[in-house]
């Protein structure tokens, strides 16, 4: 079960929201300040950060910046009683999953948390997928990379052979090895992988 990390300087809000979230089935760790959250020695496992914007000391947007700089990808749902549009735009542009105005209902908060965790899981899978693709790409020889780049541009085997000064049969051999090493079952899948890696593809 994911953990919800609740950071709010108002004790009554922390108590109320913690109860709401626990009743919805989440594990909850609450903190009275951004500094207390950063100093907490426990492992910040997968979950969601529910974060008040306006707090003494390091405020919510400041904590968001701090976490981004440290590479922490925990999704953030902001809460505020003093929110305005520029603040919410700033938070969302910086990667926040949602921005809710207090007082927040249990259903609205639970829905925002679930959506944030779902989107984060999807983004995590995408990052892992890209890492796997890069690892496979690193296994290709220089010639295989050249052939892959040409395939991505829509070049035919005979055109690639002419471009690289090799025979068409050799291109076919390289193409088969590329498919195997990139773990692509079809050319369409290989082109999808090339696009994900930023290798120029034909349109």
Image: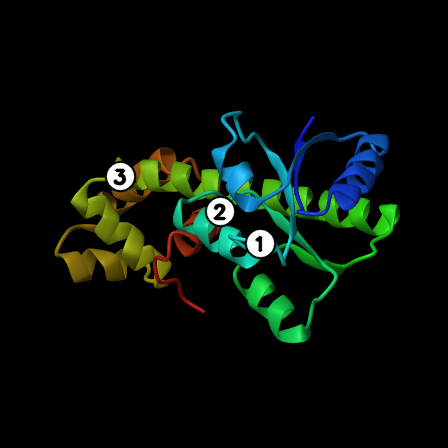
Location of residue 37 in the rendering, given as x and y in whole percent from the top left corner: 55, 38
**Which residue bears the numbered disc 2?**
189
| Image disc number at residue 115 | none
Marked residue nearer the N-terminal end (2 or 1):
1
Marked residue nearer the N-terminal end (3 or 2):
3
Q: Are marks 2 and 1 in contact (CB under 8 Å)?
A: no
Task: Locate residue 169 relative to residue 202 in the image: left or right.
Answer: left
Instruction: Looking at the picture, tell me which residue is in the foreground, 20 or 123.
Output: 20
**Which residue bears the numbered disc 1?**
56
Q: Please give the name of the residue rendered at 20% of the width and 56% of the height, measured from the top-left corner.
A: 161
Q: Please give the name of the residue rendered at 39% of the width and 52% of the height, measured from the top-left corner.
A: 194
Marks 3/2: CA–CA distance: 18 Å
Q: Find the residue positioned furthest to the left.
A: 165
Q: Secondary structure at mark 3?
A: helix
Q: Secondary structure at mark 1?
A: loop
Image height check: is 90 above or below 77? below
Marks 3, 2: nearer the viewer: 3
Location of residue 201 in the rendering, given as x and y in whole percent from the top left corner: 39, 62
Instruction: Looking at the picture, tell me which residue is in the foreground, 178 or 98.
Output: 98
Location of residue 162 in the rendering, given as x and y in whole percent from the top left corner: 18, 61
Q: In which quadrant will I find the N terminus?
A: top right
Q: From where the camera sits, is residue 65 visible?
A: yes
Task: Locate residue 28 relative to residue 156 in the image: left or right.
Answer: right
**Which residue bears the numbered disc 3?**
138
């Amino acid at each position: 079960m994911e953990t919800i990390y609740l950071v709010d300087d108002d004790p009554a809000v922390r108590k109320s929201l913690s109860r709401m979230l626990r009743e919805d089935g989440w594990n909850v760790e609450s903190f009275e300040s951004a500094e207390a959250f950063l100093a907490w020695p426990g492992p910040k496992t997968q979950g969601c950060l529910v974060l008040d914007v306006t707090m003494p000391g390091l405020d919510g947007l400041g904590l968001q910046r701090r976490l981004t700089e440290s590479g922490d990808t925990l999704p953030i749902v902001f809460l505020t009683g003093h929110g305005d549009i520029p603040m919410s735009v700033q938070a969302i542009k910086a990667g926040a999953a949602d921005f809710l105005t207090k007082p927040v209902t249990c259903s609205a908060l639970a829905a925002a948390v679930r959506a944030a965790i779902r989107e984060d899981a999807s983004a995590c899978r995408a990052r892992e997928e890209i890492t796997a693709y890069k690892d496979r790409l690193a296994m290709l020889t220089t010639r295989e990379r050249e052939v892959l780049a040409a395939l991505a541009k829509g070049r035919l085997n005979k055109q690639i052979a002419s471009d690289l000064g090799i025979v068409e049969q050799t291109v076919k051999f390289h193409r088969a090895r590329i498919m195997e090493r990139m773990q692509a079952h079809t050319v369409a899948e290989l082109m999808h992988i090339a696009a994900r890696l930023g290798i120029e593809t034909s349109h």
